[in-house]
Amino acid sequence: MQHIAVFCGASSGQDPIYMEAARNVGRTLAHRGIGVVYGGGHVGLMGAVTDAAMEVGGTVVGVILTFMTDKELAHDRITELVMVRDMRERKMVMHELSQAVIALPGGFGTMDELFELPTLSAPEMTALIGGLRVLDANTGGSKPGVFTDRSGQLSSDLFIHLLDRSMVWPPKAAEEGIYGSHHRKTGDLKWTATRVDMVFDSNSQLRALSEVFAQSDAKEKFVKDLMAA
C-alpha cells in the first residue's frame, strides 16, 4: 500500500473550511486505498484527517513524540502508532513511511516539516509557496498571503510586497493569527498574512531568498525554481 504524509496543524484554524478540507483529504485518501501518515495527534486538523479516514475504513499511521503520549494527545483509534524520541526522528520516520506529501493549513511546525523534505531545496520550496499564494490556491479561496492585485497570474508579487518598506506590519495588530500590512503614512490596510507568510521576512535564510526573488531580473530564476518543485 502507498502512503501519503499529511502535514497540518494541531489546531482547528480560524475558518471551519479548514476542518472540512482536512476531513475531505482523509476520506479521499482512504477511498483511493492510500494510507495516511501523520503526526499522531487526535486534535485539530490532525484529528480531522485521521477520523475521516478511519470512518471509511482507511489505514492511518501516526508518528508521535513519546512525551506527547504522556499528555494524552495521541490518537488511540488508528491503525498503528509509532513513538519516537525527538522531532528529527519523527520527520525522518514520516518521510521513510510515505511516498508523497500533502500540506494542509498549519503554523511554523508544518512549514518546518515541508522544508525538511529531502527532494526540495530551500529556493524551490520558497518559490513553490510564493507561487501558490499568488495563484490563489489557498483553501476555500482565503486571502491571507495573497499579496497581489493580479490574483491567478504567476508572479513574484508575494516577495515584492512582503519586503516593501513603505508598508509596516504592526507587531500587536495580529488577530487570531492573521497579520495586517498597513501603509506607513496613511495607516490603511493593504494585505493580510499568516505566521507562515511572515517567516519569509523574519528568518534570515528565507528573507535572503525573498530578496532574490523580489528583484526585477529574477523572474526566470523564480519560475525555474517553482517548476523544479
Image (tube, grey):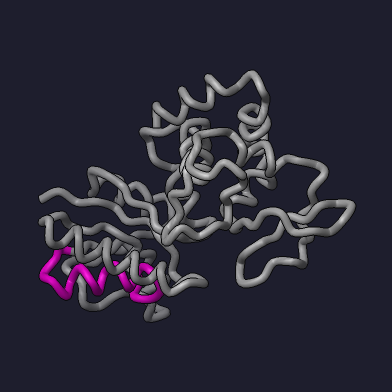
Q: Is residue 90 left or right of residue 188?
A: left
Q: Nearer the viewer, residue 38 or 90?
A: 38
Q: Residue at x 20, y 68 (%)?
A: 53
Q: Is residue 48 shown in magenta?
A: yes
Q: Is residue 44 left or right of residue 163?
A: left
Q: Quadrant of residue 201?
A: top right
Give the magenta-colored segment's residue range: 41-59
Q: Residue at x 33, y 51 (%)?
A: 102
Asked if 51 appears above or below 58 in the picture, the reply is: below
- Looking at the image, the residue that sits furthest to the right is 185
Q: Is residue 175 shown in magenta?
A: no
Query: Dividing the image into 4 quarters, which one contains the C terminus?
Result: top left
The answer to whether residue 197 shows anywhere in this view is yes
Q: Is residue 213 left or right of residue 91?
A: right
Q: Residue at x 75, y 41 (%)?
A: 164
- Looking at the image, the residue that sits furthest to the bottom is 72
- Looking at the image, the residue that sits furthest to the front is 150
Which secondary structure class fits the magenta region best? helix
Q: Nearer the viewer, residue 45 or 89?
A: 45
The answer to whether residue 82 shows anywhere in this view is no
Expressed as whole percent of the image width and height from the top left, the position of residue 19 reads 38, 71
Expressed as whole percent of the image width and height from the top left, the position of residue 82 reads 26, 62
Expressed as whole percent of the image width and height from the top left, the position of residue 206 reads 61, 38
Asked if 166 appears above or below 26 in the picture, the reply is: above
Q: Is residue 190 left or right of residue 129?
A: right
Q: Number of marks in the image?
A: 0
Asked if 88 appears above or below 84 in the picture, the reply is: above
